[in-house]
Image: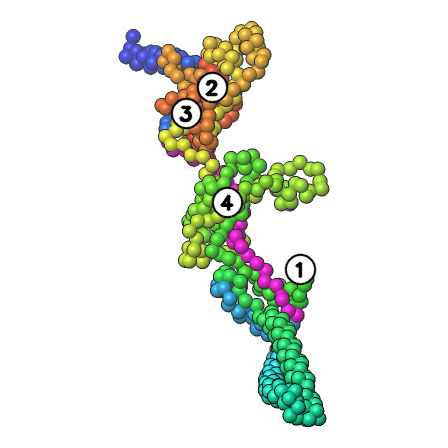
């Protein structure tokens, strides 16, 4: 046999051997399912509930018109920081000023009259004192003449003259006492008129003061819907021309957000919160929950379900109020009412927990999985065993753990108990130990995966990146 033929036969033999080996490998790999796997471990886990809403001050007021009139000057504009008592605006005040001036003149005149009545009162007091002195003198005379008359040393006519003079002085004293009482009454009455005028003046000053609007607290002017020259109207709630401006107290800032009805049961007062504002990227504001709403709000309209007249079932949210911590001075200058905000509420936290990726969880019937495990992931030939085992349909939550059996990697369904749920992971409280290798994807594969199925690591980069995302 020639050398050429030997070489040809050798090549053919190698090809046949390679084909046999390849066929054997392909046959052995025919029932192997590519999956993504991960080993579980321990780490700190935080459960977070997210909500979106807007920044709001805890306290804000609409400063309304307290007097009717034209705006003569506006001293603040939107975005200004004002101090308590600072003048914000003034209205025309000609009439109130004239009323105050007229009443001031009336009060001055009444006080002058009081002084005049006091002088008359003093005159009456002096006249009464004089009359009492004369009466005392007449008393001495009548007493002396009484003795002389009794001793018949004076005539009856002289005695009667002295007696008449005494009686006149008694009447004079009484008249002077009445005049003094009248003078005092007139003085008291005039003082009452003065007090009445002063009380009326306080009302006039109040009317004049209402033409000046002042800041009730330190705050930020967030809205000025009027201009100088416009006429303000009083007594009409939320009507055009009844609100001068809106003032927000930025010393206490809140984020009012809405949380899905499925998450609100986990939200409690004083839970820590991280708040981010769309307009301030890269900044995180710390806060805590200060209010958890009791009323469910329709997601499409924001109306409370108790006020809705429709019976349509739709998704609902609950209002959560988060108070930001330590936002004073320079820290809150950039925060403005109405800015869109996102709140991440930490509802639970576990340290050094056994953590499992959420996508690895599946629901299966343990009895059915046990049958598949015995048959290497396949249906029994008659199918009766699986049908009998799955009659009750008692599905539980668990994962597929990868184990090596006779040199092959096969999966086995293991029920697990879970605890705190994070953004992408969940705490395992029972069923798994750190280091266990579990199947995390593909999703379509997990839907149909059965215990006992041979698996291998999926090396498809696109699939791996999709699963990771």
**Label 2 with label 1: CB-CB less than 8 Å:** no
Q: Nearer the viewer, residue 424 or 238?
A: 238
Q: Rounded to the nearest whole Å, what is the CA distance between mark 1 and mark 4?
A: 30 Å
| Quarter assignment of residue 180 | bottom right
Q: Which secondary structure, mark 4? A: strand
- Measured as percent of width and height from the top left, residue 411 is found at 44, 17
The residues colored magenta run 43-68
- Measured as percent of width and height from the top left, residue 26 is found at 42, 16
Name the residue tied to disc 2: 415
Q: Is residue 382 above or below residue 94?
A: above
Q: Count of labels shown?
A: 4
- Quadrant of the snapshot with the N terminus: top left
First in sequence: mark 4 vs mark 3: 3
Name the residue tied to disc 3: 37
Q: Rounded to the nearest whole Å, what is the CA distance between mark 3 and mark 2?
A: 17 Å
Q: Which colour scheme appears in the figure?
A: rainbow
- Measured as percent of width and height from the top left, residue 91 is found at 61, 72
Name the residue tied to disc 1: 237
Q: Rounded to the nearest whole Å, what is the CA distance between mark 4 and mark 2?
A: 39 Å
Q: Rounded to the nearest whole Å, what is the CA distance between mark 1 and mark 3?
A: 65 Å
First in sequence: mark 1 vs mark 4: 1
**In front of the other: label 2 or label 1?**
1
Residue found 55% across the figure and 10% down from its top: 389
């Amino acid at each position: 046999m020639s050398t050429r033929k030997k070489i040809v036969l050798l090549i053919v033999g190698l090809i046949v051997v390679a084909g046999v080996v390849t066929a054997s490998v392909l046959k052995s790999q025919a029932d192997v399912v590519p999956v993504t796997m991960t080993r579980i471990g321990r780490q700190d886990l935080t459960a977070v509930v997210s909500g979106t809403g807007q920044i709001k001050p805890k306290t804000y007021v609409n400063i309304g018109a307290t007097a009717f009139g034209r705006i003569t000057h506006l001293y603040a504009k939107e975005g200004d920081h004002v101090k308590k008592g600072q003048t914000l605006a003034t209205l025309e005040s000609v009439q109130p000023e004239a009323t105050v001036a007229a009443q001031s003149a009336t009060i001055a005149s009444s006080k002058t009259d009081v002084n005049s009545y006091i002088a008359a009162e003093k005159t009456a007091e002096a006249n009464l004192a004089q009359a009492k002195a004369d009466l005392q003198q007449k008393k001495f005379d009548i007493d002396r003449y009484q003795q002389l008359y009794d001793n018949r040393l004076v005539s009856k006519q002289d005695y009667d003259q002295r007696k008449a003079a005494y009686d006149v002085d008694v009447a004079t004293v009484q008249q002077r006492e009445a005049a003094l009482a009248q003078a005092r009454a007139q003085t008291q009455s005039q003082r009452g008129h003065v007090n009445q005028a002063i009380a009326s003046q306080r009302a006039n000053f109040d009317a004049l003061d209402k033409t000046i609007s002042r800041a009730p607290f330190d705050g930020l002017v967030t809205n000025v819907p009027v201009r100088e020259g416009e006429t303000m109207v009083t007594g009409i709630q939320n009507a055009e021309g009844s609100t001068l401006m809106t003032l927000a107290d930025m010393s206490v800032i809140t984020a009012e957000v809405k949380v899905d009805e499925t998450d609100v049961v986990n939200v409690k007062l004083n839970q820590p919160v991280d708040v981010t504002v769309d307009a301030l990227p890269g900044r995180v504001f710390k806060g805590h929950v200060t209010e958890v709403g009791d009323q469910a709000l329709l997601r499409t309209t924001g109306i409370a379900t108790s006020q809705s007249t429709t019976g349509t079932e739709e998704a609902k949210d609950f209002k959560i109020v988060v108070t930001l911590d330590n936002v004073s001075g320079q820290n809150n200058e950039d925060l403005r009412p109405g800015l869109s905000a996102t709140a991440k509420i930490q509802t639970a936290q576990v340290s050094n927990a056994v953590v499992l990726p959420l996508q690895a969880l599946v629901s299966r019937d343990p009895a059915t999985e046990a049958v598949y495990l015995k048959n290497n992931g396949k249906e029994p030939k008659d199918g009766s065993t699986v049908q009998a085992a799955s009659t009750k349909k008692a599905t539980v939550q668990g994962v597929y753990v990868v184990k090596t059996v006779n040199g092959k990697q096969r999966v086995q369904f293991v029920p697990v108990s879970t605890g705190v749920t994070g953004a992408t992971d969940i705490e395992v409280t029972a069923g798994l130990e750190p280091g266990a290798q579990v199947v995390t994807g593909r999703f379509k594969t997990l839907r149909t995966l059965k215990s006992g199925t041979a698996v291998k690591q999926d090396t498809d980069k696109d699939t791996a990146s999709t699963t990771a995302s």
